[in-house]
Image (cartoon, rainbow, N blue to C red):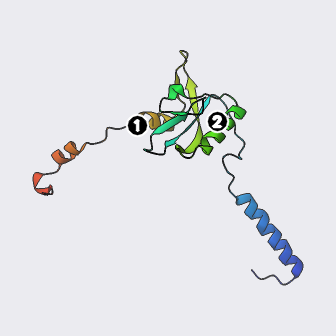
């Protein structure tokens, strides 16, 4: 874009920088957290990628029932900040909604978290099933 007058150049530059700031991504730690029910902080374990949950004592567990449950934004933010700082043991920390059953059991709050906790929603084929499905002539001989 060619602008002939210096005043228009400054105006265009200011508009560009204003638009760029609006498009800049905000860190999840800086975003305002809206809590509408109980939540936990979840991540993936560094060593093997397993789904893990933040405990109240600052450790991690693979058991959803042992996770620290937060019910307000300040508590959720504190859990998330501590979890994010612990990037040696866990990566990809985020806040996930949960449901509390009448008996006190903590359950995933949505389909994504149910899948992360319980695994795929379909039966995955085993190698023996694959070999049965493929004619013997197609198997690679060592």
For the C terminus, which image quadrant?
A: bottom left
Tell whether 1 sits left or right of 14: left
Q: Quadrant of residue 11?
A: bottom right
The furthest residue to the left: 137
The furthest residue to the bottom: 4
Is residue 1 depicted above or below 132 in this figure? below
Circle 2: is it few (<14), some (14-19), or many (20+) Cα within 10 Å?
many
> Which residue: 71% across, 47% down?
30
> Which residue: 80% across, 72% down?
13
Return the residue at label 2: 79
Circle 1: is it few (<14), some (14-19), or many (20+) Cα within 10 Å?
few
| Image location of residue 57, percent across then percent down | 60, 29
Q: Quadrant of residue 126?
A: top left
Tell whether 32 sits left or right of 110: right
Q: Are marks 1 and 2 in contact (CB under 8 Å)?
A: no
Give the camera-side residue of 132 and 91.
91
- Res 119 label: 1
Marks 1 and 2, Cα distance to the nearest angstrom? 25 Å
């Amino acid at each position: 874009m060619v602008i002939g007058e210096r005043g228009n150049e400054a105006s265009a530059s200011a508009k560009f920088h204003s638009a760029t700031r609006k498009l800049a991504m905000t860190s999840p730690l800086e975003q305002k957290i809206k809590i509408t029910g109980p939540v936990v902080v979840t991540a993936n374990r560094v060593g093997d990628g397993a789904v893990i949950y933040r405990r109240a004592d600052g450790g991690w567990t693979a058991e959803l029932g042992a996770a620290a449950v937060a019910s307000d934004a300040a508590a959720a933010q504190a859990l998330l900040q501590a979890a994010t700082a612990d990037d040696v043991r866990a990566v990809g920390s985020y806040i996930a909604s949960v449901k509390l059953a009448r008996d006190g059991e903590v359950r995933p709050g949505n389909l994504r978290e149910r899948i992360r906790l319980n695994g795929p929603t379909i039966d995955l084929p085993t190698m023996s099933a694959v070999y049965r499905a493929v004619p013997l002539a197609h198997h690679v001989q060592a």
